Image (cartoon, grey):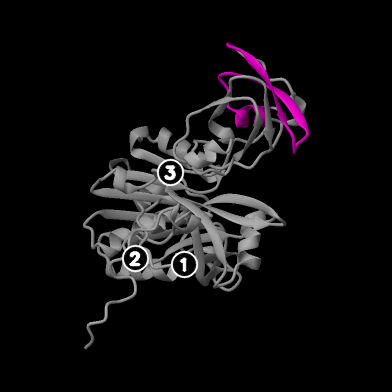
Amino acid sequence: MTDTLPAWAGTRAWDDEDTDGLLVCRQIHSLTPDVRTFVFQAPEPRLFRHDPGQFVTLGVDIDGRSVERCYTISSPPTRPHSVAITVKRVPGGLVSNWLHDRLRPGRTVRARGPLGDFSFIRHPAPKYLFLSGGSGATPAMAMTRTLYDLAHPADVVFVHSARTPADILFRRELDLIAATAPGIRVVHVCAADGPAEPWGGHRGRLTFEMLRQIAPDFRQREIFTCGPAGYMAAVRDMLSTAGVGRDHCHEESFTFEAPPSPASMTDTVEATEGRVFTVEFTRSRRTLTCDADTSLLQAASRAGLSLPASCARGMCGTCKTTLLAGSVDMRHNGGIRPREIAQNKILLCCATPQENLVVDA
């Protein structure tokens, strides 16, 4: 028996301005051949406070350039001494491949957050339905882990769609949770057999009939959906057709609207009303026009210019850049700090021009 307190006792909560948002990678776990979980702690003992389902914006330096991407926190707030993200390797993905190939325990990254409002905390209900596809399982897992740790009495149905049994995320942990928590039921849907395991469960894409078999009372549940764009669109249409009210359906997606086809691309964005200004993107070597009611990111997308972006809501900071000349109106949701604004940083997704601009993007 000892009176010595653990190192983290009495520590304060971590925030994104604490030690400049630095996090130290402590552990890396392989979940599937192309998905890994990265566990972080602050350089000094800190406790991580967040709502289950929120995300962080991770910043890394690649080839001398700072790059930011959003990743859901897959660890629950009930385990506050570390924070984890679960990342799928994306073919050609700049940051996901860097994390898989370069990040090692002991190395540091920058992080900002937590951010986002995709959480059952904001929509308390006696019954939940979590629908996920691929790596979209991460916010559902964070919420399920939280409910499990708290022995919460909520009735939860967790439905996850994967390519094969080998691609099911968190499979062993979910099996344990389902076996030991009477209120949590887990169902997997696979498109095909695995290389070493034939699949005997629900097959193919999630359909209305399949959902009705899994959760006959789905219309009475608070529904949270996350996954690839195609999966999200299909689930949205299915729930709408089934008569589920939009106020009971919640989505999380970091996919920004795709640019138009080349045939419709133009460097001129017609203003339906108000004033029109020129915007020069110096690194992209493009100049286009944008009206006072259109965000710079939206104008760039319409003109076929692909720029880094994720949430498109002024929250994540992925589209942050430097305003070299001119002025903008910017109404953000926490994705940029006051000191960054003082350094002429802006968020393209929520900045609209007030005069002709020059932007470092």
Provide residue 171's location: percent of width, then percent of height: 45, 67
**Which segment did they paint magenta?**
273-302
Depth check, front residue: 332 or 312: 332
* Residue neighbourhood size for the residue with mark 3, other residues' Cα within 10 Å, grouped as few (<14), some (14–19), many (≥20): some
Give the mark nearest the N terminus, 2 or 1.
Answer: 1
* Residue neighbourhood size for the residue with mark 1, other residues' Cα within 10 Å, grouped as few (<14), some (14–19), many (≥20): some
Direction bottom: furthest residue: 1
Callout 1: SS: loop
- Residue type at mark 3 is Phe
Residue at image location 57% in from the left, 54% down from the top: 59
Residue 43, labelled with which disc?
1
Callout 3: SS: helix
- Residue type at mark 1 is Pro
**Residue topped by disc 3:** 208
Does 292 lie within the magenta span? yes
Does residue 353 show up? Answer: yes
Structural distance between the alpha carbons of marks 1 and 3: 48 Å
Q: In terms of image quadrants, where is residue 264?
A: top right
- Asked whether the beta carbons under mark 1 and mark 3 sit within 8 Å of each other, the answer is no
Callout 2: SS: loop
Residue 14, labelled with which disc?
none
* Residue neighbourhood size for the residue with mark 2, other residues' Cα within 10 Å, grouped as few (<14), some (14–19), many (≥20): some
**Residue topped by disc 2:** 79
Q: Quadrant of the N terminus?
A: bottom left
| Residue 78 to residue 124: above or below | below
The answer to whether 356 appears left or right of 83 in the picture is: right
Provide residue 159's location: percent of width, then percent of height: 41, 55
Direction top: furthest residue: 273
Give the mark nearest the N terminus, 2 or 3.
Answer: 2
- Residue type at mark 2 is Arg
Depth check, front residue: 7 or 33: 7
Provide residue 265's location: percent of width, then percent of height: 74, 26
